[in-house]
Amino acid sequence: MTNRPEGDARAARNARREAARQRAQRARAQQKRRQRGVRLGLQIGLGVVLLAAATIVTLVLVDSVKPAGPGPSTMSQGGITIGQGLEPVSASSSASPGAGATDGAGTVRITLYVDYLCPTCGEFEQANGGYIEDLVDSGAATVDIHPVAILSNRSQGTKYSLRAANAAACVAEHSPEQFYAVNQALFAKQPEQGTAGLTDTQLTRIVTGVDGLTERRAVTSCIADQDYSKWVDEQTTSVSQGDIPGSSLTEFPGTPLVLVNGQQYELTSPVTNDDFRTFVVTAAGATEATPTPTPSATPTRSATPSPTPTKR
């Protein structure tokens, strides 16, 4: 008698075990391939994320150090010079605004550093804006107006000072003949410090509502795109660090900074026109004269200082 049936059964069991072992090996191999694929995918994905993050950081850094670019063509020294007839004076025909400089034969040079959110700037404009306008319009003086953004962090995060100064710069570039009028309009509608200020839409409405403004579309686009905001920020930083055209000062005292022929005017409290008239006459060289006081509460505009000689 032979054991063939038992041998056949053993062989069958061995064959099944071998088949199971091979299936298990294939399953393990497939699992390893899947795991390698997952790891590779994660590595690729992580690499893409890291590359994207590095690109963003690089762009942010490049953007932060990118030069602000040129300012308005009428503001080569950071401010626009307004002369007789309230017309802008070209850089080529305007004297360099150094300390003590005058424009032309005895023409008084007034220099203003203003922030359109600064309440004292608004008070100075209310008391003296018309007087300066008459001096400049008649040719007795020129005025350099430098919009800066000292109070950008005082408007609930909206950076109103920066946006308003940008709007003024837009006018200086695209409609400089109306700059003085726009400067007056911005102070006439000045929001309170600590509020959100005006929106860009409101700023645009005020600026473009000034009579005679040209290139309204270009001005509107300039305000919306913040074309000169980085330039304003750069100018503000430079002035804050003591680089103050039109003055021999080495430290910026804050806004408003008012200079007459390079001499700093110390503001009174309250700000008055009579006191400023006296300073203008003195700074212009009339040291033996004092202006005739204006009897009314509201100062009467005068094209030139009105000195009354005093006897010694």
Image: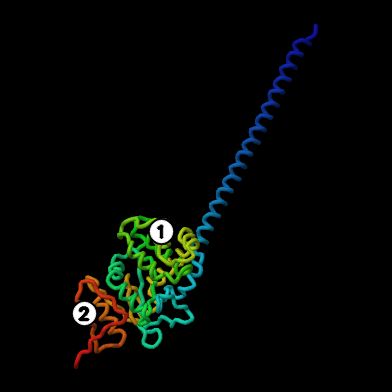
Residue 27 left/right relative to 164: right
User: Which residue is identified by label 1?
Assistant: 205
Residue at the image point whose x is 42% and y is 57% from the top:
200
Where residue 189 appears, as percent x and y from the top left, is 33, 61
Front residue of this view, candidates 157 and 196: 196
Instruction: Kindly tell me whether residue 247 is visible in this rendering.
Output: no
Tell me if label 2 and label 1 are in contact, CB under 8 Å: no
Residue 255 left/right relative to 268: right
Question: For the residue carrying disc 1, how many other residues have a C-alpha within 10 Å: few (<14), some (14-19), or many (20+)?
Answer: few
Query: In the rendered image of this protein, does residue 13 appear above or below residue 298?
Result: above
Query: In the rendered image of this protein, does residue 183 appear above or below residue 38?
Result: below
Front residue of this view, candidates 264 and 41: 264
Q: In which quarter of the image is residue 241?
A: bottom left
Residue at the image point whose x is 41% and y is 70% from the top:
179
Where residue 38 appears, as percent x and y from the top left, is 61, 38
Front residue of this view, candidates 265 and 206: 206
Instruction: Kindly tell me whether residue 37 is visible in this rendering.
Output: yes
Residue at the image point whose x is 35% and y is 69% from the top:
114
Q: Which of the image's four quarters has the C terminus?
A: bottom left
As shown in the figure, which amino acid type bears the numbered disc 2? Pro
SS assignment at label 1: helix
SS assignment at label 2: loop
Of callouts 2 and 1, which one flags the residue occurring earlier in the amino acid sequence? 1
Most extreme residue toward the bottom is 312
Count of all numbered marks drawn on residues in the image = 2
Residue 158's label in the rendered image is: none
User: Which residue is identified by label 2?
Assistant: 293
As shown in the figure, which amino acid type bears the numbered disc 1? Arg
Q: In which quarter of the image is residue 300?
A: bottom left
Most extreme residue toward the front is 211
Where residue 61 appears, as percent x and y from the top left, is 50, 60
